[in-house]
Amino acid sequence: MTPRLEKTSRNSLKKRNALHSSQPQSSRSGIITFWAIVSIPIILILLCVILEIGNLWLARIQFKNALESGALAAVKEWGDGGGGDTTLARETGNNFAALCMINGTPVELDTIDATLNDTSPNSTVTGTSNADCNGVFVFGSLVCNNPDFQFDPCNAYGCAVPANVLVDASGFATLAGAANNDWGISVQPTNTTPPGTYVTRVVIRLPDNFGPNDPVFDFRLLQPTVSSNTSSSDVTNKVRCFFNDLACSSDDRTQADVLGISPGDVSFSVLSTAQFGDDGAGGRLESSATGIAPAGQRGKVLAIDFCGSQPCDSKTCTQSPFEPGDRIRFGALVNNNTNGFPLFDGDAIGNMGAEVTVFFNNGAYITGSFNNNTNSQSIGQRACSNVSFAPWGSCAAATRSGMTFAGYLPDQPPRLNVGGNNGQSIAHLQQTSGVGGYGLAVRAQATYEVPSLCNMLFGVPIGPFHVTAKADATYQCSTGRLRIYHLDDENLNCANPLACP
């Protein structure tokens, strides 16, 4: 091959190699450009989705916080006022919710529901004024439905029960006499006492560190025992006409110590001071095997437990619950914590300021102290002998000739004042309003509109979105404490249209 031909061949080869090497570079540039054009919108969409999800997640947390704040404020306002009208409580809840922000905007629930679900003053729903079950605020109460609580949107169970309870200690020298009737508990109704009300527990607490003669309930010698006197003809009945009062007929001179409840449906526990307190669930103090004071069955607190008819009651009745109009008398020894002497009589219970708390089946309670009754009670009938109570809490017209005199309490044993000591102390516990309950409760619920952060993408509008949340708060009657709790929707005893009796 000549040098000229060889040079020409080498140049042709270089051109062909150059041509082949330039084609892949052009293709790769085109592919990169193509994927860049395609991926940028996808990246923007993904970025927008991430931003929106984060925004909605944050908005829901903020909205939940706002509803919890509103529910707590509403139920506190309502509970501190003892229930009743809900208008101010709804406004208070709305104001507190508005203190919370979503993306810098106050959460104003009245922009979602201008009435805040309030039908006042033309409400047909007693005590709650809820327009329906889907409103931003639903007021009601927690009621027992073993093993869970249910939300009742129709009734406002406040922190009081309209009833009178008379607890007396009437005995000289000892409060555990042979007839087992030196202590008495009488439940007396008022004209607003709701049907189905009954007492579940009575707790009597002796003071701590009461000088050298420190008193305790002592089970070592005698167990507390309910009187077996269930007939008005028993001569050992505690409540009776005194000195053969002529106002009483011969067959109506005494009142049965126990009426309306079986003695077997009453149980006693003596508790140490450390074991006395609120259980955090509406003030009901539950007795148990571990509640017995360990040191020889002595303690500052005597708990008297009654049976009940509701599923949440730990003991069902063989006869009937301890209802208004019923009474019991029993004996329970109180003596010195150090050596067992002296024994304390009825006057001493009032002098030391012993306390008594009565718990009702709906979680309400009444509390007070014994006072030493120094009056002579030697004239007149102090009994409601074999008769029922009138709605206002005094004796109804007797079926026979039994009667009460003005100034004397029904079911109060008459006492003879001897040298200023009549052996009697009385705790007369009264409530005039309310219905009582495990707790007033408020549900705050709503759906809130959340604007889109992206707003528009490639000419397509985005949003707005919506977040839904709910919060449940309760007001505990026994402590006044507030609590956020979880209520499953199946326990929200509410259906639209809201139909309340």
Image (tube, grey):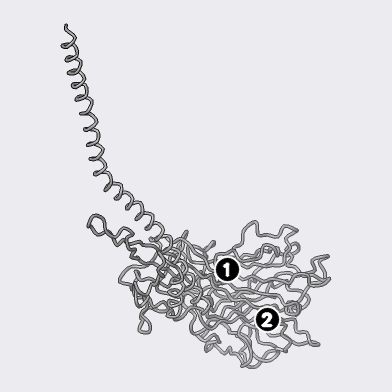
Res. 321 in view: no
Does residue 165 lie above or below 482 as drawn?
below
458 or 93: nearer the eye?
A: 458
Residue shown at 57% from the left, 68% from the top: 283
**Image-based side of 79 in relation to 208, left or right:** left
- 10 Å crowding of disc 2: few (<14), some (14-19), many (20+): many
Mark 2: which amino acid? Ile
Residue shown at 70% from the left, 60% from the top: 293
Res. 284 in view: yes
**Image-based side of 307 in relation to 48, left or right:** right
Residue 273 figure quarter? bottom right
**Res. 283 mark:** 1
**Where in the figure is residue 78, as x and y percent of width and height?**
48, 76
Q: Mark 1 against mark 2, which lies toward the viewer?
A: 1
- 10 Å crowding of disc 1: few (<14), some (14-19), many (20+): many
C-alpha separation, residue under disc 1 versus residue under disc 2: 23 Å
**Res. 426 mark:** 2
Residue 325 figure quarter? bottom right
SS under mark 2: strand
Mark 1: which amino acid? Gly
Residue shown at 36% from the left, 81% from the top: 123
